Amino acid sequence: MPGHEIVAIGASAGGVEALGRLARGLPPDLPAAVFVTLHVPPSQPSMLPHILSRAGPLAAAHARDGEPIQHGRIYVAPPNQHLVVARGRVRLSQAPRADGFRPAINVLLRTAAWAYGASVVGVLLSGALHDGTAGLAMVKARGGIAVLQDPSETLYPQMPSTAMKHVDVDYVLPVAEIPPLLARLARTPVTAGPRDERGTPAALPASSAEEATVETVANGMATGFVCPECGGSLWEAFHRGLIHYHCHIGHVFSVDGLLAGQADTVERALGAAARALQERAALSLRVARRVRETGDDATARRLETRARTLEERAALVQRTLEEVLKPESAQEQ
């Protein structure tokens, strides 16, 4: 009987160091495939496969759409593409961003759990954000194992700490102790089958991982809020004990993700307002100079007065923007 043959790992800030240490401790004959999603900028090349290949005995590479899953390999999510686990194959997806990320950790964990059920080990490492909690909850719901890097040793503890609050985690370990655990679990026969929403055994078709790329909720409640990504209507749903917001395009947000997205929207709007006011002031001064050259001093003075008013309003918006961007702890003082 096969063991836990799918290891799905997510990391964000501080995660490169943790991933390198984890890869260093994996055995060369690991009877499992390892999948890694790290938050990376969409337009910059990622050196993570090279780093992981040099750190440990397993070959790491950016995943290729449609390639077969093989034990003893590390598949890394390429920039700007979701890493999706289908039954027997690796898939890449350009589906909408989840919590503002593509690749997103939740997508990797959800699809792995959907395709392989109890054979999955989900791992969350250092990260300053909250991506991964919902996916780890699905890993547990389908009978898999949930593992966290001990938040006390991470550079950024928010990701594993958030998961600890919402998921019944099996192991919380220093990163040096995770590779031996993964090696042991890979050789431990899996007796439980995949589970459906009620916790009873369920058969999973080969295509179900692709269908779970973006988690949709049928019975959502309209909120009146708009999606920070596309401006569409957002629906609220309670799913596996967590609150999610989703739009019809497919963008998905946790509560923290939606708050962060709204903060970005406010920052962009105030920044645009400040720039527009500054440009109107500059245009008024430019025209005032031209008009004064014609001898129309009255019109020039009126334009100069308008320019000063616009500059004052731009400064006010700029101060408001700086206040909005302060950390919440600083605003409360």
Image (tube, grey):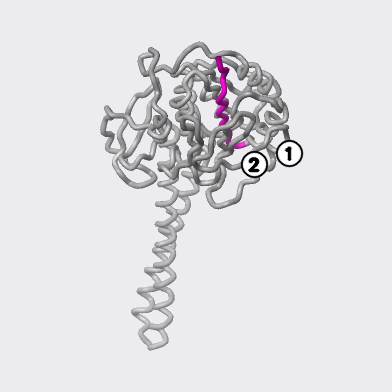
Question: Which is more toward the observer, 149 or 199?
Answer: 199
Q: Kindly identify the amino acid type of the residue bearing the numbered disc 1.
A: Arg
Q: What element does badge 1 sit on? A: helix
From the viewer's perspective, tell me whether residue 15 is left or right of residue 223.
right
- Residue at 47% across / 51% down in the picture? 319
Residue lying at the far bottom of the rendered structure: 294
Would residue 166 be visible to someone looking at this image? no
Question: Which is more toward the observer, 133 or 228?
Answer: 133
Residue 122 lies, with reference to residue 231, above or below; the image says above
Residue linked to disc 2 = 48
Of the 4 image quadrants, the one containing the N terminus is: top right
Residue linked to disc 1 = 54
- Residue at 71% across / 23% down in the picture? 176
- Residue 182, quarter of picture: top right
In the image, which is nearer the foreground, mark 2 or mark 1? 1
- Residue 283, quarter of picture: bottom left
Residue 190 lies, with reference to residue 260, above or below; the image says above
* x, y percent for residue 227: 35, 42
- Residue at 65% across / 45% down in the picture? 47
Asked if residue 306 is among those painted magenta in the image, a careful observer would answer: no
Asked if residue 2 is among those painted magenta in the image, a careful observer would answer: yes
Q: What element does badge 2 sit on? A: helix
From the viewer's perspective, tell me whether residue 140 is left or right of residue 291.
right
Q: Kindly identify the amino acid type of the residue bearing the numbered disc 2.
A: Leu
* x, y percent for residue 201: 40, 14
Would residue 43 be visible to someone looking at this image? yes
- Residue 211, quarter of picture: top left
Q: Which region of the structure is painted magenta?
A: 1-13
From the viewer's perspective, tell me whether residue 314 is left or right of residue 248.
right
Mark 2 and mark 1: span between their CA atoms? 10 Å
